């Protein structure tokens, strides 16, 4: 893959920074240097922060029986320590080593679960507590520190003095290690969570309080950098907002519990994030599937929304995050109108520019494929492709260019985006009381000399969504004949919807789970109904279908289509043609 000069420059800066942080991290944690300047040991915990993640007491019984189920994999320990077992997947190991499952033992609330928690913590200290390996990776270490602090009442209640001291020594060692290696955390959410974990430690541990001022300044700087003015996260992943709120809301309470004013940046970040939660939600409460979002955790959403005092109308325009929302009647349209995030934050970003999701009442109709809750790495590159989104693909190529070098992939902890849309134009307006969004991007300008423009018009009552996709030369007056010009316009459907093709081959009837009916019509274009996969189902990937319109940009540079709600009295049978929309020229 050949990179442009600008792409090579950005990649060189990123690689150099990662290499430098890796080298300094190794020096800081070398055995000869690790303890030389170590401060005194922490002798007690002051407070334990609240854990907002939902706990399940039945999981405590499974853990006590030696059955550890994480990320779709189950390991039965058979009287061995789970930390001695060979992990069935990296995701399983990350969940085990992060100790988030301690909350399930706490929910059991018995002497047995407390003893079990102490035994498992003691096992980890004995087997892995000396440092090194996956267990001490910055993101896992951050999660474990937060888990141990929040579940400290479970672990140390009824504990003897010997275990108490061992627990505190290990916790202090982990915090000290994270202070030296936090810069090694991958940019974005992992880097911010590392600073959050250190802030928790400064508030909750007596011997760490002297670091609070420095850590709070660092937290403020990261929040101001990563939380955009409209409340989105710099990675453009809606799911990052949920994870952050679950950590930041208890952090705000921890500041209050210590009678320390929370940083202004923390309060401002929370105020900005809350409205963005409503922005990304469909009528059924699910989040739109953009840039790494998977199944929406309804329990976690309900928890964080309980802290929302505003309950205002969702934003319609999130220009910094790169999203647009159209609301009318009971219909919601959410559109990705953003450029890919910076290369160092793009390891999980998707090539979904101008993709959209469309819902009516509690029914999601048009969706993106999303990502599954488990086995994400097996599906990630498939899900990141433009073809997994409800938008246009040119010549079976994604609108973003992914780095495919194996050695660089390992160094950068993933596959970043090194090229894609650099100019996304957006215009909003009204026509006949309907909301109109006109957006275009240049993601296909370099390889295929074409610019994609999409116009969406949502009727005032929400009963009709008209769309138009246009293809114009990005340079000159025409697309060069030597360049292929095949396009596919895809509309991935929610697996709960039953789709049947119209007899004229130009549309489809869509039957909702509640027997409501919508009709899709492409007017003069032939429509294909093909297989697809919905990855973000609560029970894992599910088969579904997609509506596809194929064509050639030189022959057909303008394609119109429409979704129309069919009134119940006329919803039986297959419908005929729909009047063509009148969209802005």
Image (tube, rainbow, N blue to C red):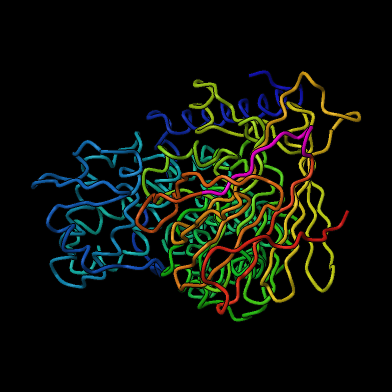
Residue 437, by quadrant, is bottom right
- Magenta highlight on residue 547: yes
377 lies above or below 232 = above
Viewer-side residue, 480 vs 282: 480
- Magenta highlight on residue 558: no
Residue 227, by quadrant, is bottom right
Question: Looking at the image, how many numbered discs can be counted on the residues?
Answer: 0
Compared across the picture, whether 416 is left or right of 194 comes to right
Write the residue at 56% across / 54% down: 503
Compared across the picture, whether 507 is left or right of 434 comes to left
Q: Which image quarter holds the N terminus?
A: top right
Write the residue at 54% across / 59% down: 212
The picture places residue 460, in percent across and down from the top left corner, at 74, 74
Secondary structure predominantly adopted by residues drawn in magenta: strand
The picture places residue 109, in percent across and down from the top left corner, at 21, 73
Viewer-side residue, 179 vs 360: 360
Q: Which residues are magenta?
A: 546-556
The picture places residue 28, in percent across and down from the top left corner, at 48, 33
Write the residue at 69% across / 63% down: 465
């Amino acid at each position: 893959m050949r990179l442009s000069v600008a792409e090579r420059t950005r990649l060189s800066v990123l690689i150099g920074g990662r290499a430098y942080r890796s080298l300094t991290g190794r020096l800081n944690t070398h055995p000869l240097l690790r303890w030389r300047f170590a401060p005194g040991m922490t002798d007690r915990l002051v407070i334990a922060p609240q854990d907002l993640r939902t706990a399940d007491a039945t999981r405590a019984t499974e853990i006590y029986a030696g059955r550890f189920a994480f990320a779709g994999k189950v390991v039965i320990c058979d009287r061995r320590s789970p930390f001695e077992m060979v992990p069935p997947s990296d995701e399983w190991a990350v969940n085990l080593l992060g100790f988030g499952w301690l909350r399930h033992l706490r929910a059991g609330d018995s002497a047995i679960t407390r003893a079990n928690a102490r035994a498992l913590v003691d096992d980890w200290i004995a087997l892995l507590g000396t440092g090194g390996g996956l267990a001490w990776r910055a993101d896992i270490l951050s999660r474990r520190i937060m888990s141990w602090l929040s579940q400290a009442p479970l672990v140390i209640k009824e504990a003897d003095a010997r275990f108490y001291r061992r627990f505190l020594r290990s916790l202090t060692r982990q915090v000290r290690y994270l202070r030296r290696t936090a810069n090694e955390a991958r940019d974005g959410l992992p880097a911010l969570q590392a600073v959050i974990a250190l802030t928790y430690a400064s508030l909750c541990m007596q011997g760490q309080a002297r670091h609070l001022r420095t850590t709070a300044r660092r937290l403020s700087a990261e929040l101001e950098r990563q939380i955009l003015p409209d409340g989105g996260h710099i990675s453009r992943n809606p799911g990052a907002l949920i994870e952050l709120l679950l950590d930041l809301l208890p952090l705000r309470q921890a500041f209050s519990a210590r009678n320390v004013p929370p940083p202004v940046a923390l309060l401002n970040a929370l105020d900005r994030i809350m409205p963005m939660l409503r922005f990304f939600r469909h009528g059924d409460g699910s989040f739109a599937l953009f840039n790494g979002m998977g199944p929406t955790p309804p329990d976690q959403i309900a928890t964080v929304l309980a802290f929302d005092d505003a309950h205002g109308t969702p934003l319609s325009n999130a220009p910094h995050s790169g999203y647009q929302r159209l609301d009318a009647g009971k219909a919601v349209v959410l559109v990705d109108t953003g450029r890919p995030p910076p290369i160092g934050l793009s390891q999980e970003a998707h090539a979904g520019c101008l993709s959209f999701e469309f819902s009516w009442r509690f029914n999601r109709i048009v969706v993106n494929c999303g990502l599954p809750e488990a086995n994400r790495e097996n599906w990630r590159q498939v899900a990141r492709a433009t073809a997994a989104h409800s938008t246009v693909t040119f010549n079976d190529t994604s609108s973003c260019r992914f780095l495919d070098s194996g050695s660089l992939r390992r160094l950068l902890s993933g596959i970043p985006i090194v090229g894609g849309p650099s100019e996304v134009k957006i215009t909003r307006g009204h026509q006949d009381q309907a909301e109109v969004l006109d957006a275009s991007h240049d993601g296909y300008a370099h390889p295929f000399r074409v610019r994609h423009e999409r116009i969406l018009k949502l009727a005032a009552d929400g009963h009709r969504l008209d769309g138009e996709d246009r293809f114009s030369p990005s340079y000159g007056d025409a697309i060069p004949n030597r360049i292929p010009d095949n396009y596919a316009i895809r509309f991935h459907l929610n697996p709960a919807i039953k789709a049947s093709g119209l007899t004229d081959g130009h549309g489809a009837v869509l039957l909702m789970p509640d027997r409501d009916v919508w009709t899709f019509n492409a007017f003069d274009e032939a429509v294909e109904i093909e297989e697809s996969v919905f990855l973000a189902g609560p029970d894992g990937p599910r088969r579904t279908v997609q509506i596809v319109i194929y064509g050639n940009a030189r022959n057909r540079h303008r394609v119109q289509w429409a979704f129309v709600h069919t009134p119940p009295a006329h919803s039986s049978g297959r419908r005929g043609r729909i009047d063509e929309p009148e969209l802005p020229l």
